[in-house]
Image (spheres, rainbow, N blue to C red):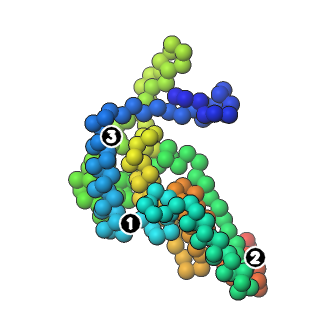
Amino acid sequence: MFPKPGQNQKLPGNYRPISLLSNLGKIYEKVILARLNEHCSDLQIIPDEQYGFRPNHGCVHQLLRVTNLITHGFNNKLYTGGVFLDVRKAFDRMWHNGLIYKLIANKLPHYLIDIITLFLLNRTFKVKLNSTLSETGHIKAGTPQGSILSPLLYTVYTADFPVNNHITNCFFADDTAILARAFKVNFLKKVSHRSVQ
């Protein structure tokens, strides 16, 4: 594991794990990624509001979208409220069985689900500190650090984020903004009504 720059090295959470992948494994992952991308596109799994990990989409495009929404609301005397979420260690927290369930629910081909299941399950790790090596641990969540499949798998995992006609979701990778617009009176009533519940 490598220490994260500028972090307290006494805390275990401030280290990056190393996943050693063979060249053959990397080529195999590229083939699987191409197939997974193709099926996600055909089945329209990835929400249009997700601007991370997609070609011709970027952080600047999502920021422009949010800015335009707020500016449009301001010009029409609407208040815009926002909730901003950042999932900490998002790739490390993906629940394997939940991801596999979502792959099945989205009707991805069985062969692809089987490959991804084998890719995720039965992974192990060891920690070496100086000359001491820990016992083997079993990884029960997350995707391998540095795998090119991880971003798309995370996007599929979070693709069923709730949608509503009264809010606008804005996603960039594991960062989420939930925006709502309303006139002053309606906005204040909605906020006070929700705080009472």
Which residue is under mark 3?
26
Task: Report crowding for label 3: few under 14, some 14 to 19, many 20 or more residues within 10 A (C-alpha).
Answer: some
Mark drawn on residue 192: 2
- Check the image and report above or below for 195 versus 113: below
Quarter of the image with the C terminus is: bottom right
Identified by mark 1, the residue type is Ile
Task: Report crowding for label 1: few under 14, some 14 to 19, many 20 or more residues within 10 A (C-alpha).
Answer: some
Q: Nearer the viewer, mark 1 or mark 2?
A: 1
Residue 121 location, quadrant? top left
Do tag 1 and tag 2 residues touch (Cβ < 8 Å)?
no
**Residue at horizontal 30 percent and vertical 62 percent from the top:** 39
Residue 150: percent from left, percent from top = 42, 48
Task: Report crowding for label 2: few under 14, some 14 to 19, many 20 or more residues within 10 A (C-alpha).
Answer: few
Mark drawn on residue 45: 1
Residue 72 location, quadrant? bottom right
Identified by mark 3, the residue type is Lys
Q: Secondary structure at mark 1?
A: loop
Q: Secondary structure at mark 3?
A: helix
**Residue at horizontal 62 percent and vertical 58 percent from the top:** 85
Residue 124: percent from left, percent from top = 40, 32
- Check the image and report above or below for 105 versus 127: below
Residue 159: percent from left, percent from top = 45, 63
Q: Is residue 85 left or right of residue 118?
A: right
Mark drawn on residue 94: none
- Check the image and report above or below for 24 versus 172: above
Residue found at the far top of this picture = 131
* Viewer can see residue 190: no
Q: Earlier in the sequence, mark 3 or mark 2?
A: 3
Identified by mark 2, the residue type is Ser
Q: Earlier in the sequence, mark 3 or mark 1?
A: 3
Q: Nearer the viewer, mark 3 or mark 1?
A: 3
171 vs 156, nearest the viewer: 171
